């Protein structure tokens, strides 16, 4: 094989499948045949608007960064993997030498090369290369789909780590897109059993219940603080994980979380300035955590998925061949309420 199919985004709303050269792995890289790869909210955003913040699509780019597949070739210096291994790919390759990399917070590495973040190509393609320490072997009983879902699940895992979650925490997750829904699973991995969730969309609330939420709320109808107080006999929410990026939701978690509680902010508001009551934050002695992507979450996820029946695949609502990429992204763009995770299959 010398050429492969890849989906190229030429400019916003203009995506096409083209025949391009199969990449050659460098000495420390592996070549992976992509089995399946998810559509992420960020991919859809680049497709629609051509940029996210300071990252701008200035030349044609391949999107996609949530994948699993088979190793077909390894570089001369690769020792940890061999052809035939099934792997999940962590899509952000870091320098390994900066202060952040050396202190284990490599998600903050200024040199990171993250797939499908301009100008770095992603993997909506038949093959992709990655440095070998970012390909993680997955066990036989784990599906490729679960392997691909480790990437968005990792965001939830990192949220749990940032928020110093304990099994006896009572948690509120606001926003039930793919990240919020998979955060339910991440909470379960950390032993949390009381997981309250809120979203305005009924379909998403139903899916949250299927995925193991304790109870779901509609933030426009329910008094969440009162209801949770009753359900927890007055103890209240210890930790809130805000994934919606809705300014109102950010304000809400600051009134719902109990005094001394912790708040993890995952979602990015479209307008970055949200009025919040500082006096209340100080008086409540809240711990508020920001977070960016994840670090060291793949081994945790692989161990947890391999040993539990987490049924991550319940978040997959649609499956498409790479040839139908335009239809797939349009589905993700226009049916946000009902298309949760869309999976692309380059080999079909
Ligand atoms: Zn993603
Ligand atoms: Zn670094």
Image: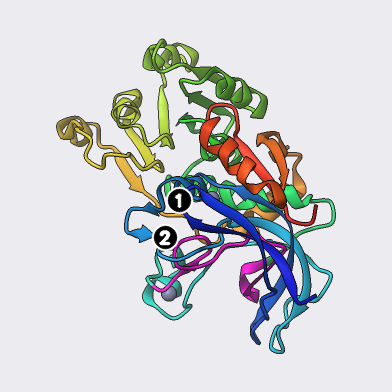
Which element type, helix, strand or loop, lies under badge 2?
Answer: loop
> Residue 226 appears in which quarter of the rendering?
top left
Give the residue number, with chain letter if any, for mark 2. 57
Q: Residue at x 52, y 51 (%)?
A: 14
Circles 1 and 2: CB atoms closer than 8 Å: yes
Quadrant into which the N terminus falls: bottom right
Q: Nearer the viewer, residue 307 or 174?
A: 174
Whether 132 is among the magenta residues is: yes
Residue drawn at 75 percent across, 42 percent down: 308
Q: Which residue bears the numbered disc 1? A: 12
Q: Which residues are magenta?
A: 111-135
* Residue 135: image location, x then y, percent: 66, 68
> In the drawing, what numbered circle is on residue 306?
none
* Quarter of image, res 329: top right
Please tell me whether residue 76 is drawn above or below residue 291 in the rendered image: below
Residue 90, x across and y down, in percent: 60, 62
């Amino acid at each position: 094989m010398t050429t492969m199919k890849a989906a190229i985004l030429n400019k916003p709303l203009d995506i096409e499948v083209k025949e391009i050269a199969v990449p050659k792995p460098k000495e420390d890289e592996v070549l992976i045949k992509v089995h399946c790869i998810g559509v992420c909210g960020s991919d859809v955003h680049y497709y629609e608007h051509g940029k996210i913040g300071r990252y701008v699509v200035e030349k044609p780019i391949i999107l996609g960064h949530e994948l699993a597949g088979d190793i077909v070739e390894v570089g001369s210096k690769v020792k940890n993997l061999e052809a035939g291994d099934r792997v999940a790919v962590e899509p952000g390759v870091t320098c390994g030498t900066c202060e952040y990399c050396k202190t284990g917070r490599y998600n903050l590495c200024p040199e990171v090369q993250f797939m499908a973040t301009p100008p770095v190509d992603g993997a909506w393609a038949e093959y992709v290369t990655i440095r070998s320490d970012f390909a993680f072997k997955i066990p036989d009983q784990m599906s490729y789909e679960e392997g691909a879902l480790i990437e968005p699940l990792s965001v939830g895992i990192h949220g749990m780590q940032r928020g110093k979650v304990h099994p006896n925490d009572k948690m509120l997750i606001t926003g039930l897109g793919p990240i919020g829904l998979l955060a339910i699973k991440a909470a379960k991995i950390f032993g949390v059993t009381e997981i309250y969730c809120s979203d305005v969309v009924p379909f998403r609330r139903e899916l949250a219940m299927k995925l193991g939420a304790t109870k779901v709320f509609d933030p426009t109808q329910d008094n969440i603080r009162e209801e949770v107080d009753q359900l927890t006999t007055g103890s209240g929410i210890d930790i809130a994980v805000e994934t919606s990026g809705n300014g109102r939701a950010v304000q809400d978690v600051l009134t719902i979380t109990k005094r001394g509680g912790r708040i993890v902010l995952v979602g990015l508001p479209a307008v970055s300035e949200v009025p919040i009551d500082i006096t209340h934050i100080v008086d409540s002695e809240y711990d508020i955590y920001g977070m960016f992507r994840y670090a060291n979450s793949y081994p945790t996820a692989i161990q947890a998925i391999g040993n539990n029946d987490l049924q991550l695949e319940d978040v997959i609502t649609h499956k498409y061949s790479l040839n139908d990429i335009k239809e797939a992204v349009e589905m993700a763009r226009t049916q946000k309420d009902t298309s949760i995770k869309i999976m692309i299959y380059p080999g079909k």
